[in-house]
């Protein structure tokens, strides 16, 4: 019996050894064949089964030796062996290759996605730049192709105002009546506003007499603004034609209303030459159309020495005996009609006059007189549009008495600023002035001569009283007659500098109080600051006004001034000295405007815009220059300074 059990035990050990050897062989074969994950999982299964068989043999032997262990304990041990074998499995072979290929594909996909996003962003930026460039090239300010036209209607009829607007980007439109914006929501059913592809219209339903008035539309975009006007006249059936006389109106209706037959076009006359604008009408002007008006830049013109107006039954003329740069601008002729007016406009550019010496500057313009007093005044002007071949050194001021042609120089050295005080003038006389610009090449043509200016005391009216009496009579009493008897005058007071420039100082003071009845003259004394030596500043020059220009001062030094009053009885004591005064600093040139942008308006014109200079009170305007691309030959566009930013 014992022998049989020993044989059985040896056979079981032999079977277990063979099974273990088979498991090792199958595992090595699996590694060499690079099986898939499923095959690897299947290859893991036989060892577990074998382990289970081994465990079963072990359990049988344990049952023979000890029957105390239960079947649950065997299951737990088998489960632990299973988990241990699963934890020992690793990836290799085909699984590793597939993992690397998947990682490579994912990396390539991510790189391609990133590149596509970057390329898409670059493409969008370039497309936006191209779009902005196209919009900038096609940008145009708001304007009217067809403006509003006046209408005359009967009561309880509808009227429709229409106009054609262009501009890029598309402009916004607002309608107004007598300057008040029209809001259809306030009066429902009365107004109807439409915009169909640039055709703007305003329809007024069932008109009444209150609807008569001036209607306007204002269109604007980022590049400009424009306004068109039209009158609407609502007639009553009772015979009142909007203020027109009932008897005269039908007669006027029978006359043929004149229109423009031949008009003037944009022109380019040369400075100092004679020139005229003419306009021919389609028929003789009726009486109600004979009030022809001329405008320059929207301002009505009047006849003068420099401007003449002539008119016949079928034509009108505007004559310039001598054209100057001040005459440059937009000219408009207007004729009245039964329903409003008709007008035509064109721009006149004034070219520089021919010069004897090449490279000299152009002539100054807009010479004006300010602060006129008994014996002095201030002149101001605008610089010329062209400096010539070199920079402008300064300006010379000339004067002559009205009615003569004897021009005298007012300053010994060039004035660098466009402003100059002219003194030593005779009270009661009339003067005219002109200005020349000078550079290293020579002197320019003189500017346009000012109108005659009479030297009077501006405070004279304040010293005169008019007392009304009965029977429409008056008595005029001057302040001088009310002054107390004064022999030797009192000294003036409040001596100070009203203006300081790099070449002169303007002194001001107050008259002595009481002033006395006798006329006063003044003596001005100067002294270096800190010195007690006084010398006369107005040598042999009588000063009749409480203001004097001192020009012979040294740069970098300070001066004190005092003033004495003089009449026929004697000379007063000197006033208190002024505070130390020195010449002003040389004004720095203005910086150039920024953000200059030009865009095409029509086939032959362009619009230029720029940013105005900030904190530049001395800026009188802007000059625009142009040149062909690839060249440096800059030419003046406007000979008259532009005060706007376009």
Image: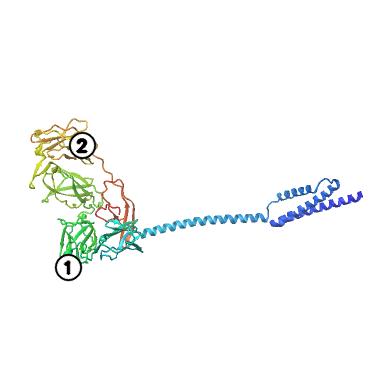
Check if mark 1's residue and mark 2's residue have beta carbons within 8 Å: no
Q: Position of residue 29 (x, y in %)?
A: 74, 56
Residue 470: x and y, percent?
A: 8, 45
Residue tagged 1? 251
Question: Most extreme residue toward the right, as rendered?
Answer: 1
Residue at (86% x, 46% y) in the render: 65
Res 626 quadrant in image = bottom left
Give the secondary structure at mark 1.
Answer: helix
Point out the frontmost of discs 1 and 2: 1
- Is 223 situated above or below 614? below
Mark 2 Cα within 10 Å, few/some/many (few <14, many 20+)? many
- Does residue 81 appear left or right of residue 152 in this picture? right
- For mark 2, give the secondary structure: strand
Q: How is the image coloured?
A: rainbow
Residue 63: where, in percent of width, then height?
A: 84, 48
Q: Which mark is residue 189?
A: none
Residue 441 appears in the figure:
yes
Judged from this view, the residue extending furthest toward the front is 238
**Residue nearest the viewer, comparing 556 with 7:** 7
Q: Which residue is mark 2?
A: 496
Mark 1 → mark 2, Cα distance in angstroms = 70 Å
Does the rendering let one see residue 414?
A: no
* Lateral position of residue 278 relative to residue 123, left or right: left
Q: Nearer the viewer, residue 147 or 328?
A: 147
Q: Position of residue 614 (x, y in %)?
A: 31, 47
Residue at (86% x, 50% y) in the render? 9
């Amino acid at each position: 019996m014992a022998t049989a059990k020993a044989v059985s035990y040896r056979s079981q050990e032999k079977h277990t050894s063979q099974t273990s050897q088979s498991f090792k062989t199958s595992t090595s074969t699996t590694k060499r064949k690079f099986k898939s994950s499923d095959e690897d999982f299947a290859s893991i299964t036989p060892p577990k089964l074998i382990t289970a068989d081994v465990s079963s043999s072990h359990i049988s032997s344990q049952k023979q030796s000890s029957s105390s262990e239960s079947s649950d304990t065997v299951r737990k041990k088998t489960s632990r062996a299973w988990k241990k074998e699963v934890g020992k499995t690793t990836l290799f072979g085909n699984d590793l290759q597939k993992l690397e290929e998947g990682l490579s594909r994912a990396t390539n996909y991510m790189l391609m996605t990133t590149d596509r996003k970057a390329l898409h962003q670059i493409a969008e930026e370039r497309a936006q730049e191209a779009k902005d460039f196209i919009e900038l090239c096609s940008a145009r300010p708001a304007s009217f192709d067809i403006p509003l036209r006046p209408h005359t209607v009967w009561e309880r009829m509808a009227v429709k105002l229409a106009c054609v607007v262009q501009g890029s980007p598309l402009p916004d439109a607002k309608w107004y009546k007598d300057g008040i914006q029209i809001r259809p929501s306030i009066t429902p059913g009365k107004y109807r506003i439409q915009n169909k592809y640039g055709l703007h219209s305003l329809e007024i339903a069932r008109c009444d007499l209150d609807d008569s008035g001036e209607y306007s539309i204002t269109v604007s975009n980022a590049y400009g603004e424009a306004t068109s006007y039209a009158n609407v006249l609502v007639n009553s059936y009772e015979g009142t034609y909007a203020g027109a006389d009932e008897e005269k109106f039908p007669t006027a209706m029978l006359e043929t209303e004149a229109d423009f037959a031949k008009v003037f076009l944009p022109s380019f006359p040369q400075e100092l030459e004679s020139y005229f604008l003419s306009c021919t009408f389609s028929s003789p002007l009726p009486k109600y159309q004979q009030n022809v008006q001329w405008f320059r830049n929207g301002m009505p013109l009047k006849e003068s020495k420099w401007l003449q107006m002539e008119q016949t039954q079928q034509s009108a003329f505007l004559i310039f005996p001598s054209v100057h740069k001040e005459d440059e601008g937009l000219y408009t002729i207007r004729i009245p009609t039964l329903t409003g007016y008709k007008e035509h406009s064109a721009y006149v550019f004034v070219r520089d006059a021919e010069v004897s010496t090449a490279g000299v500057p152009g002539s100054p313009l807009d010479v004006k007189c300010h602060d006129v007093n008994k014996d002095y005044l201030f002149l101001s002007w605008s610089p010329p549009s062209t400096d010539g071949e070199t920079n402008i050194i300064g300006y010379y001021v000339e004067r002559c008495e009205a009615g003569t042609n004897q021009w005298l120089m007012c300053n010994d050295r060039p004035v660098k600023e466009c402003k100059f005080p002219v003194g030593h003038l005779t009270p009661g006389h009339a003067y005219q002035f002109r200005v020349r610009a000078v550079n290293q090449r020579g002197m320019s043509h003189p500017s346009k001569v000012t109108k005659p200016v009479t030297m009077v005391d501006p405070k004279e009216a304040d010293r005169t009283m008019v007392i009304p009496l009965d029977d429409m009579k008056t008595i005029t009493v001057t302040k001088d007659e009310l002054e107390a008897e004064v022999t030797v005058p009192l000294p003036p007071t409040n001596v100070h500098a009203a203006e300081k420039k790099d070449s002169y100082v303007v002194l001001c003071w107050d008259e002595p109080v009481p002033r006395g009845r006798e006329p006063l003259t003044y003596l001005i004394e100067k002294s270096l600051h800190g010195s007690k030596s006084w010398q006369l500043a107005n040598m042999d020059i009588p000063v009749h006004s409480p203001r004097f220009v001192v020009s012979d001062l040294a740069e970098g030094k300070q001066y004190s001034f005092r003033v004495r009053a003089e009449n026929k009885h004697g000379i007063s004591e000197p006033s208190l000295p002024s505070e130390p005064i020195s010449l002003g600093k040389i004004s720095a040139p203005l910086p150039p405007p920024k953000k200059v942008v030009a865009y095409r308006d029509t086939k032959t014109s362009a619009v230029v815009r720029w940013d105005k200079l900030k904190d530049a009170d001395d800026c009188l305007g802007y000059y625009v220059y142009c040149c062909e691309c690839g060249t440096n030959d800059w030419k003046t566009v406007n000979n008259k300074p532009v005060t706007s930013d376009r």
